[in-house]
């Protein structure tokens, strides 16, 4: 039997790879250079599933991934909350006083500012495409920030999480091709572009109020084709199989200039 595949952002050791391994046990993990490639491998049929981050508890929504999910023929079928545990990485034998460069993903650097300013006040920060990529840049004068799950020979990780806020989570979505809507769910995720008229967003939100449905998340993103117009990414707590949720979504669809169901999951 052919092994099923799941794509995610690499390289080896990335948080996305860790999430993919947890969400898709037994799948071959295909590491990609960026989020666009991650989703493209799914839509082209090269892989069976994809895992992408959609929200961080400190930095908010991952805009690039939200735009990809909205524009491509994919559907979120499961979510996974991953505790982000940042560790300082150095080659064995490297002395902290000799480090003048610290490299990692932009968000990781921003989430460890207090630690870096305290221990490396004169260091220069260099951004990488992922936390795991910083492993490739380690030398006697360069440190990195990676996840606590990373294990590589010759690399020593700090004993503790160096992030300013220890309770930092990233939410990942497991994507499949098409829109295979499940029979049941705990959450429903969709995007909507409101009519360009006064009160349009309020009227949309009132639909869910009337049906006593709790909005757990709302985020706006510009509609790229039309300056001044915005797309709202909205998540509600509810069972996609219930008449109440289906009726609310039907009304919402009719009230919007554009509407797309992006996911339904537990």
Image: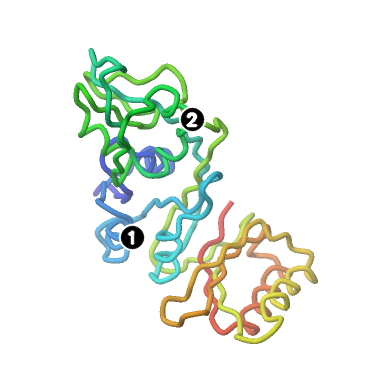
Q: Position of residue 8 (x, y in %)?
A: 33, 49
The correct choice, above or below, for 22 with respect to 199 in the image is above
The mark found on residue 54 in the picture is: none
Q: Which badge, 2 or 1, is on the more N-terminal residue?
A: 1
The correct choice, above or below, for 135 with respect to 158 in the image is below
Residue beneath the point at 43% across and 64% down: 69
Q: Position of residue 216 (x, y in %)?
A: 66, 56
The correct choice, above or below, for 29 with respect to 232 in the image is above
Q: Quadrant of residue 28?
A: top left
- Say which element carries label 2: helix
Where does label 1 land, which residue? 39
Residue beneath the point at 52% across and 31% down: 164
Residue beneath the point at 30% across and 18% down: 156
The correct choice, above or below, for 93 with respect to 203 in the image is above
Q: Nearer the viewer, residue 70 or 232?
A: 232
> What is the C-alpha distance between the residues marked 2 and 1?
35 Å
Question: For this view, does 192 lie left or right of residue 244?
Answer: left
Q: Crowdedness of circle 2 by 10 Å Cα count: few (<14), some, many (20+)?
A: some
Q: Nearer the viewer, residue 43 or 9?
A: 9
Q: Nearer the viewer, residue 210 or 158?
A: 158
- Say which element carries label 1: helix
């Amino acid at each position: 039997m052919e092994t099923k595949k799941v794509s995610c952002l690499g390289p080896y050791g990335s948080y996305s790879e860790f999430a993919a391994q947890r969400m898709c046990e037994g799948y071959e993990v295909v590491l990609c250079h960026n989020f666009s490639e991650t989703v493209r491998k799914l839509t082209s049929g090269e892989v069976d599933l994809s895992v992408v981050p959609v929200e961080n508890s400190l930095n908010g929504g991952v805009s690039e991934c939200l735009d990809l999910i909205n524009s491509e023929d994919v559907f979120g079928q499961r979510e996974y909350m991953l505790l982000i545990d940042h560790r300082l990485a150095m080659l064995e034998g490297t002395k902290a006083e000799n480090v003048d460069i610290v490299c990692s993903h932009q968000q990781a650097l921003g989430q460890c500012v207090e630690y870096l300013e305290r221990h490396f006040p004169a260091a220069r920060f260099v951004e990488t495409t992922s936390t795991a990529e910083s492993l490739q840049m380690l030398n006697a004068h360069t440190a990195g920030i990676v996840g606590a799950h990373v294990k590589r020979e010759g690399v020593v990780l700090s004993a503790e999480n160096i992030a300013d806020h220890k309770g930092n989570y990233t939410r990942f979505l497991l994507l499949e091709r098409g829109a295979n809507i499940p029979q049941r769910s705990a959450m429903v995720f969709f995007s909507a572009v409101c009519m360009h008229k006064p009160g349009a967003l309020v009227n949309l939100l009132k639909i869910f109020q009337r049906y006593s449905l709790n909005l757990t998340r709302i985020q706006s993103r510009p509609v790229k084709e039309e300056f001044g117009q915005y797309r709202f990414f909205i998540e509600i707590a509810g069972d996609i199989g219930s008449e109440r949720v289906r009726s609310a979504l039907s009304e919402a669809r009719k009230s919007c200039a554009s509407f797309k169901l992006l996911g339904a999951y537990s």
